[in-house]
């Protein structure tokens, strides 16, 4: 980021994307007219070359995209000027045309149909005042959810630093006051308007948000109006914080409740039931579940628990606001209530989670038939205002079983079944299986162990040589990761690498691998003749590639380890490129700018190789071992020749993987491949054995026999590709 951007952190150009001029006219009417907020109407090309916006204190940039608008290009522009750009206003009618990866990173969605001048001013002022919060996507998302319903609700703000309370026009009108009559009201004076019976409870839930026990709060209470009458009000709110997590501002809404139960009945109902759906709330449901459990054990009754979760429910709130989200939940609850048998125990146990206890289960097949019927009923589409909903609800089922000793055990089993259903596919269901549960628990334990493996010194690296197919000269190594578990022994990479990917541990572990590899190649290349430097190949995952500030961390690593960038080769797969092509291209180009070469691993196994290869910043192709294994087949050799011809045309290097015989080496060399790796040359070596190889200077194919003892000593007793501890140190 340039110094110019760093010095003007208060600026916030706002980009608005709309369909036609009418959208822009609507926005311009709502846009606050205070001085200092200028307006620039332009396309993306003009925006990129416009200098005027760099000098403005606050600036709204109105973009008018066409059907082929390059959203990835806008994302790149916003990312490059992150210190200046705080907000992208995006009309929700355009959301379906925008790649989710782009829209979720740079956009604050605002429905113009529900925007008012007050809510626009609040949105802008909040972002100006708390510019430091804009990097926190979670808080931006929460603020967006709250403000998107501003046409229906009435906004209030409490400055936690100054103690100033601001009630916007809607709040004053709700309480029977004229605009401005409640200005200057303190927080304590406002609380005095709350009914005495509910004042302490309201303070309690708000204090929970203040102390960050809950991200937001919801409460129903009675407020005293100017005319002396009481009005029931739904209050929502959240607490915005600074970088040190200190409270900055409480912000929320007040909405009048038109229909109410008689007060005593309502208070009794609220003590046990969720106001939105009428189901038991979590604590009341758990209490009832314990009673049902005890009775089932005493009389031998078979019961089953269904635990439901609405897939992607947050997207409903993000796109349409809380009010539509609430009605969505009510519709799902209504369908559950109609589908459940008479007397079934119904509960809302989370924001978008429901539970149903079914009594007198006849058989497992009857249970599965019930699940199929409910799945069909819950997935029927319906309309809420402008939202045409196609609900997808996943659920887990757990039966009363001898291994379930408490009601909480039954709930835990249903939760595990729900997680399995979500893993298999959204909108499905899964019946809890105790054998599968044991495997799942073992997997979760292995995942926990993997997170700590680095600190405990259980991870190690092995190095598979890459050699010249012509001369046998050693050219470098591919780094491979091994895990010696303290109780299980060697854990196969086939088992723990996918686990590291899914759990996110790959980011931490991958960086450790990269650091170790860089330090090792720096040691090996000390004192080597110029032109004979070795290279080390390190595999990168998609999660590693998306690590924040990756390029800056790479730059520092190269400086700290004092290695030449051309000693390091980053290996990626085609799937990484296709997950988020714009991001991958940006990062890979940055790595190449450092002088690091990019290798495409497992080439030919993906679906995009030929159609996209010329676009990717790739220097070397690695022919997958599956093609090398079929070299002696006519079709297999033709594929390899085609890959070699393509690489030559694109001026890329080629490395063949999985070479196991002299015949394969000769065929590859004859067809134009110059480098390779595989068991014909060497299995992966522990660091000490690899160091012996480095000091030998050359490694000819004919010398394999002389290294047989060294290679055998690097294997586990089973002969698998798992080395023992090194006999020598570097």
Image (spheres, helix red, strand yellow):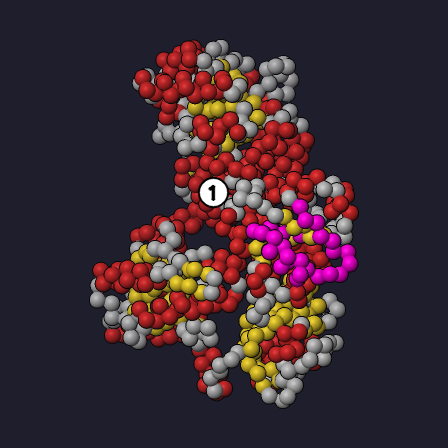
The answer to which image quadrant residue 143 occupies is: bottom right
Whether residue 664 is situated above or below residue 375 in the rendered picture:
above
Q: Position of residue 398 (x, y in %)?
A: 32, 62
Where is mark 1, residue-wise? 500
Crowding near the residue tagged with mark 1, few <14, some 14–19, many ≥20 C-alpha atoms within 10 Å: many
Q: Position of residue 20 (x, y in %)?
A: 58, 52
Whether residue 703 is situated above or below residue 26 in the rendered picture:
above
User: 404 left or right of 324?
Assistant: left
- Which residue range is magenta in the image? 13-42
Q: Residue at x 61, y 79 (%)?
A: 174
User: 23 left or right of 491?
Assistant: right
Observer-nearest of 689 and 16: 16
- Does residue 467 belong to the magenta stretch? no
User: 197 left or right of 468?
Assistant: right
State the quadrant of the C terminus: top right
Q: Residue furthest bottom?
A: 228
Residue 351 in sight in this render: no
Q: Residue at x 68, y 63 (%)?
A: 121
Observer-nearest of 171 and 420: 171
SS category of the residue bearing label 1: helix
């Amino acid at each position: 980021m340039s110094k110019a951007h760093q010095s003007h952190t208060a600026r916030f150009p706002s980009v608005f994307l709309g369909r036609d001029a009418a959208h822009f006219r609507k926005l311009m009417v709502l846009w606050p007219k205070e001085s200092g907020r200028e307006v620039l109407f332009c396309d993306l090309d003009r925006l990129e070359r416009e200098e005027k916006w760099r000098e403005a204190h606050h600036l709204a940039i109105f973009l008018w995209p066409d059907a082929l608008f390059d959203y990835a290009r806008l994302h790149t522009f916003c990312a490059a000027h992150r210190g200046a750009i705080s907000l992208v206003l995006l009309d929700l009618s355009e959301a379906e045309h925008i790649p989710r990866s782009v829209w979720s990173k740079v956009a604050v969605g605002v429905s113009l149909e529900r925007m008012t001048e007050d809510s626009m001013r609040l949105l802008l002022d909040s972002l100006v005042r708390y510019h430091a919060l804009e990097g926190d996507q979670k808080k931006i998302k929460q603020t967006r959810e709250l403000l998107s319903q501003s046409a229906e609700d009435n906004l209030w703000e409490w400055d936690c630093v100054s103690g100033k309370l601001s009630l916007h026009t809607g709040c004053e009108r709700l309480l029977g006051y004229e605009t401005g009559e409640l200005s200057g009201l303190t927080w304590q004076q406002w609380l005095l308007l709350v009914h005495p019976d509910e004042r302490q409870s309201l303070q309690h839930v708000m204090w929970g948000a203040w102390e960050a026990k809950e991200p937001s709060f919801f409460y129903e209470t009675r407020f005293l109006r100017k005319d002396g009458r009481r009005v029931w009000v739904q209050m929502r709110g959240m607490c915005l914080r600074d970088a040190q997590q200190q409270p900055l501002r409480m912000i929320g809404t007040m909405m009048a409740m038109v229909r109410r139960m008689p007060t005593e009945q309502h208070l009794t109902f609220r003590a046990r039931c969720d106001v939105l759906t009428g189901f038991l709330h979590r604590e009341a449901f758990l209490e009832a579940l314990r009673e049902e459990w005890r009775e089932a054990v005493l009389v031998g009754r078979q019961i089953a628990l269904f635990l439901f979760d609405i897939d992607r429910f947050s997207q409903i709130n993000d796109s349409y606001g809380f009010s539509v989200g609430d009605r969505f939940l009510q519709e799902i609850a209504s369908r559950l209530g109609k589908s459940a048998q008479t007397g079934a125990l119904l509960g809302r146990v989370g924001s978008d989670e429901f539970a149903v206890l079914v009594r007198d289960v006849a058989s497992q097949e009857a249970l599965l038939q019930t699940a199929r019927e409910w799945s069909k009923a819950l997935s029927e589409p319906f309309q809420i205002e402008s939202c045409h909903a196609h609900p997808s609800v996943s659920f887990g089922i757990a039966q009363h079983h001898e291994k379930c000793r408490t009601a909480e055990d039954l709930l835990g089993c249903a939760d595990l079944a729900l997680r399995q259903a979500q893993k298999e596919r959204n909108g499905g269901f899964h019946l809890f299986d105790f054998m599968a549960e044991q495997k799942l628990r073992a997997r979760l334990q292995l995942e926990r162990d993997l997170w700590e493996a680095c600190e405990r010194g259980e991870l190690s690296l092995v190095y598979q040589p890459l050699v010249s197919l012509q001369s046998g000269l050693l050219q470098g190594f591919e780094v491979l990761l091994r895990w010696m578990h303290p109780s299980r022994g060697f854990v196969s990479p086939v088992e723990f690498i996918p686990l590291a990917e899914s759990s996110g541990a790959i980011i931490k572990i991958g960086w450790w691998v990269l650091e170790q590899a860089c330090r090792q190649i720096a040691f090996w290349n000390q004192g080597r003749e110029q032109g004979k430097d070795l290279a080390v190949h390190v595999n990168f995952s998609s999660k590693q590639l998306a690590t924040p500030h990756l390029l800056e961390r790479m730059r520092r690593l190269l400086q700290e380890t004092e290695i030449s960038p051309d000693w390091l080769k980053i290996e990626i797969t085609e799937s990484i490129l296709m997950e988020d092509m714009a991001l991958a291209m940006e990062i890979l180009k940055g790595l190449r700018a450092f002088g690091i070469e990019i290798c495409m691993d497992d080439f030919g196994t993906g679906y995009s190789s030929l159609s996209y290869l010329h676009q990717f910043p790739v220097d070397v192709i690695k022919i997958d071992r599956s093609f090398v294994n079929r070299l002696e087949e006519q079709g297999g050799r033709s594929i390899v020749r085609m890959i070699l011809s393509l690489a030559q045309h694109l001026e890329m290097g080629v490395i063949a993987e999985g070479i196991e015989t002299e015949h394969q080496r000769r065929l590859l060399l004859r067809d134009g491949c110059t480098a390779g790796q595989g068991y014909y040359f060497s299995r992966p070596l522990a660091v000490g054995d690899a160091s012996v190889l480095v000091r030998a200077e050359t490694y000819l194919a004919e010398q394999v026999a002389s290294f047989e003892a060294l290679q055998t000593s690097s294997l586990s007793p089973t002969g698998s590709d798992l080395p023992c501890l090194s006999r020598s140190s570097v």
